[in-house]
Amino acid sequence: MKLNDITPAEFQACGNCGCGCPAVFETENDSYVIIGKVLPASAVEQLKGRIAADELVIEVPRGMIDGLK
């Protein structure tokens, strides 16, 4: 899978520290790959019945997605 980093510039600076940070990539499969923080169990519980066995729920800063527009 080829990944093209489309993370807004203001979120790319932390990639240099090796500490990880949210990111958005587009793929040749007409999809996105998103790196974010795993939600706490209490938040995931609110989504019960919406998450398939092969899915994971993450959280990313609003500005990261808004910056893609």
Image: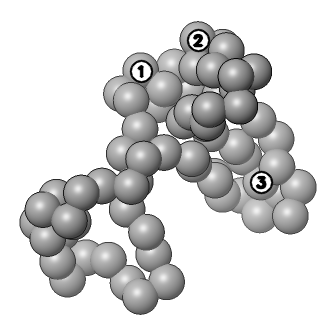
17 versus 44 height, above or below: above
Q: What whole-number distance in Å separates the C-alpha atoms at marks 1 and 2?
A: 9 Å
* Residues marked 1 and 2 touching at CB (< 8 Å): yes
Which of pointers 3 and 1 lies earlier in the amino acid sequence? 3
User: Mark 1 falls on what kind of element?
Assistant: helix
Q: Residues within 10 Å of mark 3 (few under 14, many from 20)?
A: few
**Precedes in sequence: disc 1 or disc 2:** 2
> Which residue is pictured at 51% across the width and 19% down the height?
67
Q: Residue at x 88, y 55 (%)?
A: 2
Q: Amino acid at mark 2?
A: Glu
Which x, y percent locates residue 23? 61, 36
**Separation of residues labelled 3 and 1 (CA atoms):** 21 Å
| Quadrant the N terminus occupies | bottom right
Residue at the extreme bottom of the image, as rendered: 53
Disc number for residue 27? 3
Q: Which callout, 3 or 2, points to the residue nearer the camera? A: 2
Q: Front-most of 9 and 14? A: 14
User: Does the rendering let one see residue 6?
Assistant: no
Disc 3 vs disc 1: Cβ atoms closer than 8 Å? no
| Number of numbered discs overlaid on the protein picture | 3
Residue 55 lies in what quarter of the image? bottom left
- Residue at mark 2: 10
The kind of secondary structure element at disc 2 is helix
Query: Element type at marker 3?
Result: strand
Residue 6 in picture, x, y percent from top left: 71, 31
**Tag on residue 22?**
none
Which comes before the other along the chain, label 3 or label 2?
Answer: 2
Residue 54 at least partly seen: yes
